[in-house]
Structures are given as C-alpha cells and as structure tokens.
Image (cartoon, rainbow, N blue to C red):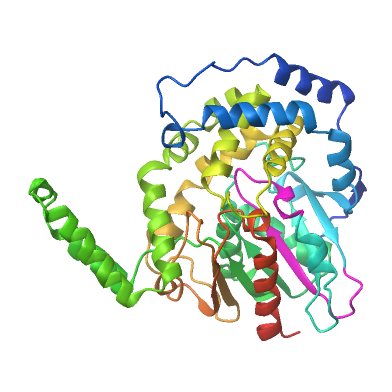
C-alpha cells in the first residue's frame, strides 16, 4: 500500500531582527556619501536614478523611517515559516483568513525587486469587504524562495517551476485549499503560469489573474510590426521616412488595438530599448551585483529605488515613497538581495520559453484567465498574445497604476480581483 508523506506543518513567527542589525543599517545609511551634483546638467532618469531624488529618499529614510513601526505593521498579520524538506526550502508566508463563510482562497505572488510587502495595502480590503455581497478572500502571500525570510535551496538548477510546485503544495497540502485563485505580476506571473500549465498542479487553480503577461505577439499587431521591420532601416536617414513609418504604424495599431493596449505596447517598447540592462547582468553574473548592492543600504536604495520609480505611476495619489524605503529596508535586514537575483539566472530558459516560444506552457482549459492592463506596466500584454496561451475570459483596462499595482492602484487591483471572482468563481 502506498504511503503519503505527511504535509509540512507551518509555525507561527514574529518578524524581528536584532537591534544591532537595525543600528548598523542606520549607521551605514548616515555615513554614506553621495556626489554633490550629477556629472552634467540634465543627467537624470534616462541615465539611471535621479541624484536629487536619491538624496531626498536617503534623507527621508534617515529622518522618518522606523523599524519598530514597520515590524508592528507586518506582525499585525499572521506570519509563518514552513519547511519543504524535499525542495530544501524554508518558506515565509502571510496567511490572513476572512470571517466571511464563503471566502475564496487567494494567493498573491510578488516578483523582483518586490517583496511580500508589495501587497500590504490590499490585504484588509480583500479580507474584509465593505459590503456583504462583495467577494471576500482568504489571503496568502508567500515570500518567494530567496526573498526576505524564505531560504534559497543549497543547490543550482532551482527554477520558477520548482517554486510553482512549492506554492501549490503550500496552498493544497499545507493550508488545505483544494481550489484556489492566483494573482501574479513580474516573476509571480511566470510562477502562476507554470502552476496552471503543469498537470500535477493545474487542476487546483480555478482562476488566474495577471497584471504582467509575456508571450509571443500574434495577430494584427504582429503583422504590422513585421511589415514595418521589413522596410530597410538605412532608409530612415531619408527625410520623412522614419516619421512616415512611425505614423503609419500608429495609425494601423489604432484600428486593431484598444487605448490600453497601445499604451502597454508603448511602455513595453520603451522598456526593451532602455530598461533591460539589469536583466543581462542578473541572468549572467547575478551574484556580482547581488553582493555589491546588498553591502550598503544606499546601494540598495539606488538600485531598487530606480526600478520602483521607473516602473510605477508616480503621479498616482496612492504612490508613496515610504513603500520604496520599506522595501529596501526589508532587503537589507534580511540580507536577501543576492539570493533574490538568482531567479534571473536559474530560470532564464523557462522564462524565455514562456516569453518567446509559440505554444509553450499553455494553461489548462479548466483554469480561467484574467488580465488587467495598468498604463505604466512595463511587461504589458495584448489580448491577442494571451488568448493562445489560455482561456482569457476577463480583461480590464485602468487609468492609473504600473508594475506594482498593489502599491500605486490598490483599489483598482482589488476591484478587478473581486469582479473576476464574482463572475467566474465556482466552488
């Protein structure tokens, strides 16, 4: 008779760090010296982090940040650690249950350079809705392996596919949710895609919502891009040719894409042209940048802060620089930045397969997909790119929000998760 391995047992924890570590962070932050001025007038975001903004963030961290306040906020929620022996991972996660009897299990998956704290603004409204007929959720937020308190296994070759299996095991075997709803952006979107594609995990995921989705372009948009690319680039030096090409492309796209899709495509092209340098570094020599940036709180502030500013809707009333500082402090105190970068190297092949290979990692037909287009998202997808991958039944566009929608448009994200669940969740 076959025996079943006992399910891992989580243990409740209080998130805390030694006072000496907090004091060291403050001391290093205070002693760090930044340049007086940029190298030349106008040197700003197009070259990296803006020096004046970095100085202001550093000053805000020095004068306003309180680890006691941040840890008290984090410990308001039930925090757990769970050992997954087969994968050699100790996983940190938050699990907040709703008192609503028919609440829906929901796992929220962050990416890089985020943390579980990305979702701190949406926990309460998702768990405790204001009206009785609004869907409520049991919210689970894991820290990905190598992030915050979650350990990285003592081996090479650990990919996002392994992480997907761990998150699935957490939801089904540890917490006992036979069917659940998943939401993911950045690496979380790739992990969720793996979960809804693999035969051993897909049948438990009823709904999967994304705010980032990378897949090969298909349909009219791909055809328009191909036609434009077929025109020799050397002709761009001829007066009026490039302007005419660009105008024709935008005119044709306006006929086949929505406003949100055109904005998403624009943001994605900008990101490909000027924002992908960190990927080349982190998927080839992740530990070089990992060790160097981890060594100083100001290094972390510059490296992570630049990404959070560049990828967010910073004019949104929900955008708050306190979230940047809290994220950076969590990386510094947990000493997790180096291990957090490893996913780029270890998961390079599977990420590229999902992003560029037609027909790769198709979702189970039993899982329904939803997507929300936030205008400042750098990894936006066209509906025509998502539908070949899975059964896309829910699509919305927002007027604000970016790569971290739970931070810069939490109300919009909650609204769409509720709407998707109300329409399609079936026990």
Q: Residue at x 34, y 70 (%)?
A: 218
Q: Residue at x 58, y 18 (%)?
A: 34
Q: Residue at x 61, y 53 (%)?
A: 404
Q: Is 160 situated left or right of 171 in this image?
A: left
Query: Between 30 and 89, which is closer to the camera in this rendering?
Result: 30
Q: Is 248 situated left or right of 356 in this image?
A: left
Tell me where the magenta segment starts and ends, as one range: 98-120
Q: Image quadrant of residue 205?
A: bottom right
Residue 245 drawn at (x, y percent): 18, 60
Q: Image quadrant of residue 19?
A: top right
Picture layout, residue 276 above or below residue 415: above
The quadrant of the image that shows the C terminus is bottom right
Q: Please indicate, yes or no, whether residue 215 appears anywhere in the rendered image.
A: no
Query: Between 69 and 108, which is closer to the camera in this rendering?
Result: 69
Picture layout, residue 17 above or below residue 191: above
Magenta segment includes 100: yes
Query: Between 233 and 37, which is closer to the camera in this rendering?
Result: 37
Residue 55 drawn at (x, y percent): 61, 26
Q: Is 143 situated left or right of 77 in this image?
A: left
Magenta segment includes 7: no
Q: Residue at x 30, y 77 (%)?
A: 255
The quadrant of the image that shows the N terminus is bottom right
Q: Is 221 situated left or right of 195 in this image?
A: left
Residue sticking out furthest to the front:
41
């Amino acid at each position: 008779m076959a025996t079943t391995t006992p399910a891992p047992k989580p243990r409740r924890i209080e998130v805390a760090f030694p006072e000496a570590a907090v004091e060291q962070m403050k001391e290093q932050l205070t002693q760090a010296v930044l340049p007086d001025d940029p190298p030349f007038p106008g040197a700003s975001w197009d070259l990296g982090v803006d020096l004046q903004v970095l100085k202001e963030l550093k000053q805000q961290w020095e004068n306003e940040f309180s680890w006691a306040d941040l840890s008290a906020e984090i410990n308001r929620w039930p925090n757990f650690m769970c050992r997954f022996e087969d994968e050699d991972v100790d996983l940190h996660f938050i699990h907040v249950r709703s008192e609503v009897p028919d609440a829906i299990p929901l796992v929220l998956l962050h990416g890089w350079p985020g943390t579980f704290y990305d979702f701190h603004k949406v926990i309460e409204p998702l768990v405790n809705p204001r009206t009785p007929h609004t869907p409520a959720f049991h919210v689970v937020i894991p820290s990905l392996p190598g992030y915050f308190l979650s350990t990285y296994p003592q081996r090479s070759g650990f990919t996002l596919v392994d992480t997907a299996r761990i998150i699935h095991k957490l939801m089904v075997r540890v917490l006992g949710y036979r069917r659940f709803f998943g939401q993911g952006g950045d690496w979380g979107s790739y992990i969720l895609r793996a979960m809804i594609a693999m035969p051993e995990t897909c049948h438990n995921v009823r709904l999967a919502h994304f705010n980032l989705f990378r897949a090969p372009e298909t349909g009219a948009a791909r055809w328009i891009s191909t036609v434009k690319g077929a025109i020799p680039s050397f002709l761009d030096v001829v007066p009026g040719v490039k302007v005419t090409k660009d105008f024709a492309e935008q005119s044709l796209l306006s006929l086949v894409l929505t406003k949100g899709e055109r904005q998403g495509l624009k943001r994605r092209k900008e990101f490909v042209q000027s924002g992908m340098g960190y990927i080349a570094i982190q998927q080839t020599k992740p530990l070089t940048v990992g060790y160097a940036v981890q060594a100083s709180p100001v290094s972390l502030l510059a490296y992570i802060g630049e990404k959070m500013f560049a990828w967010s809707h910073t004019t949104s009333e929900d955008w708050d620089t306190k979230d940047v500082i809290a994220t950076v402090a969590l990386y510094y105190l947990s000493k997790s930045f180096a291990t957090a970068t490893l996913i780029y190297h270890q998961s390079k092949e599977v990420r590229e397969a999902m992003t560029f290979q037609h027909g790769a990692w198709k979702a189970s037909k039993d899982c329904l997909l939803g997507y929300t287009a936030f205008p400042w998202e750098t990894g936006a997808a066209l509906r025509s790119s998502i539908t070949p991958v899975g059964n896309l039944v829910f699509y919305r566009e927002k007027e604000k929000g970016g790569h971290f929608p739970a931070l810069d448009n939490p109300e919009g994200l909650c609204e769409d998760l509720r709407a998707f669940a109300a329409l399609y969740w079936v026990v």
